[in-house]
Image: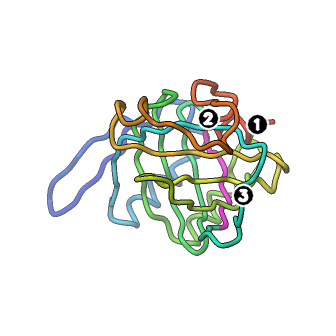
Amino acid sequence: DFYLIIQTAGRVTLFPIFNANLIKIDYDIYNILKYKGGFLMKSLEIERKFLIHTLPAQLETYPFYEIEQGYLCTEPVVRIRRQDDSYYLTYKSKGLMVREEYNLSLTKEAYEHLKAKIDGHLICKRRYKIPYQSYTIELDIFLAPQKDLWLAEVEFSSKSDALSFIAPDWFGEEVTHSSRYHNSNLSQL
């Protein structure tokens, strides 16, 4: 296993998050983390995902981000992302509806350096943020390489919230439990 060592204010924390599949990245990630001072955010991602066949009315009125993302490794998932002018390195554990997620801010230079090392295709999409009841729907309109794919994700604070969620009428088939629609897998097609 590959361990992420974070040292802040004299305290050392060890995260067993990367395995041997990541060795091909050399020590670039380690050097970037060292440069960034080891700021790492951990969260539990609880989300449901749906195919969309018909876009909601007045889509252009909702805020959106331009996203570009690539995968340094797909098992475990290690992703780099540009979201407008912000850059991130993300680790996601195995899972479908519930997964651990670690996020680290990157510089543009670090992102560009790692972008040259991705496996598979770079995913480009526009993500709309659509309010719905007490939730936010994240509607992804894929531009490349899966042009014409539309997916909606909704994140929740608990598994029980996720299970009780009733989707709006314009949502299509639920694909939460299909790893086929994980972006990491889409990048390999």
Provide the residue span drawn in magenta.
66-73
The first of marks 3 and 1 along the sequence is 3
Q: Which residue is mark 3?
A: 125
Between 53 and 127, the one lying in front of the other is 53
Q: Which residue is mark 2?
A: 74
Q: Main secondary structure of the magenta part?
A: strand
Left or right of 141: which side holds 2? left
Relative to 41, is 151 above or below?
A: above
Q: Earlier in the sequence, mark 3 or mark 2?
A: 2
The amino acid type found where label 3 is placed reads: Lys
Residue 89, percent across and down?
50, 54
Residue bearing the label numbered 1: 188
Disc 1 from disc 2: Cα separation: 9 Å
Residue in view at x 63 percent, y 27 percent: 179
Q: Residue at x 37, y 38 (%)?
A: 3
Q: Nearer the viewer, residue 106 or 180?
A: 180
Quadrant in which residue 8 is drawn: bottom left
- 125 inside magenta stretch: no
Q: Earlier in the sequence, mark 1 or mark 2?
A: 2
Q: Residue furthest top?
A: 177
| Residue 36 placement, left or right of 96 | left
Q: Label 3 to label 2, Cα distance in Å?
A: 19 Å
